[in-house]
Image: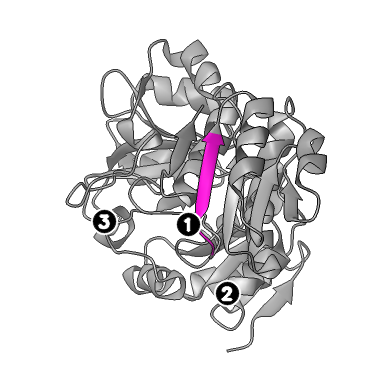
Amino acid sequence: METKRLTPHNVEEAAKIIADGGLLGIPTETVYGLGANGLDPQAVKAIFEAKGRPQDNPLILHVPDESWLERYCEDIPAVAYELTARFWPGPLTMILKRRDNVPDAVTAGLDTVGMRCPDCAVTREIIAKADVPVAAPSGNASGRPSPTTAEAMLEDMEGKILGIVDGGPCTVGVESTIIDLTVEPSRLLRPGGVTLEELEEVLGEVAVDDAVRRLLAPGEQPKAPGMKYRHYAPKAPVTVVRGDPNMTAGYIVARMGEKSGVLCFDEFQGYFRGHSVVTMGPVNDQAQQAREIFEALRAFDRLEVTDVWAQSPDDEGIGLAVTNRLNKAAGFHIVEL
């Protein structure tokens, strides 16, 4: 199969791929997605096959605006519309009660579905033109770092999808925040571009699911993407070192091997001369860390390191999303200093 490169001017061609049951790489503000008709079980099945994704990992439906919620969800709480008014289009996915027209293949058999309106005009145009919701996980092979450019997605999906729309680099860089509105208090299932603090401004109390800080155990069913399995990982094993950046840099220097790689803040690059070093932004710039984290993790595969040591941001703001992705890449192999 040849994967066709499309531009934002090819909306009709891209929409036809979706409407006809094909797979399409789509740009969003978070990461590139692997999109298909979310009402077509066979098209959804093709997503899982292309990614090598476990069948018990639910997908998110992407829609062009909040008016589509009623088509696929029921018992929608008023607070959902408060959230859409503030954060849509944007990096927020809401878990809501699904209608019967949403296939089990999308929800992994759950009675809920994740809904999102991406902050990418061309992708919203494609969805509206296809006139179906687009089911789309991140556009990487399962377990690999998510792609934030079309080129990165093609590393994993060349020849597996009919087309990809190149919308340029993603502006947020980590997947959407997922908030479950079917429970009280609302529960954060995955941190992302909308921060916990921002959610609390609208919702008041927000519970944080255990899966944000640990892997789900065997037999536990994930309610949203990214909760259960080791994700975002380069081929080499990753160890995350948490604590004061000066202390973590010293700890890594004392323990790294000759062919170890290091993921560090910009200010600490000089500590690791002679080693394969990838930076992820300054200590105090969490937004840049979010934009850089996945491409940084992908870089270690090209460097052929034996293992990776990573400094870790703190958990404030979007830093919670960055640390969550790092911890999952490491399979929660974390050293606390």
- Can you identify the residue that label 3 sits on? 108
Residue 11 visible here: no
- What stretch of residues is rendered in magenta? 236-241
Find out whether residue 71 is within the magenta segment.
no
Discs 1, 2 touching: Cβ within 8 Å: no
The N terminus: image quadrant: bottom right
In the displayed structure, 212 sits above or below 31; it is: above
Amino acid on which the number 2 mark rests in the picture? Met
Foreground pick, 193 / 46: 193
Q: Residue furthest front?
A: 254
Residue at screen point 50% across, 22% down? 196
- Can you identify the residue that label 1 sits on? 137
Discs 2, 3 touching: Cβ within 8 Å: no
Amino acid on which the number 1 mark rests in the picture? Pro
Residue 262 locus on image (x, y percent): 67, 49
Residue 157 shows which numbered tag? Answer: 2
Is 223 left or right of 301, judged from the image as shown? Answer: left
Q: CA distance from mark 1 to mark 2?
A: 13 Å
Foreground pick, 228 / 82: 228
In the displayed structure, 1 sits above or below 84; it is: below
Residue at screen point 58% across, 25% down? 314
**Among the two numbered marks 1 and 2 on one chain, the one whose residue lies closer to the N terminus:** 1
Residue 87 visible here: yes
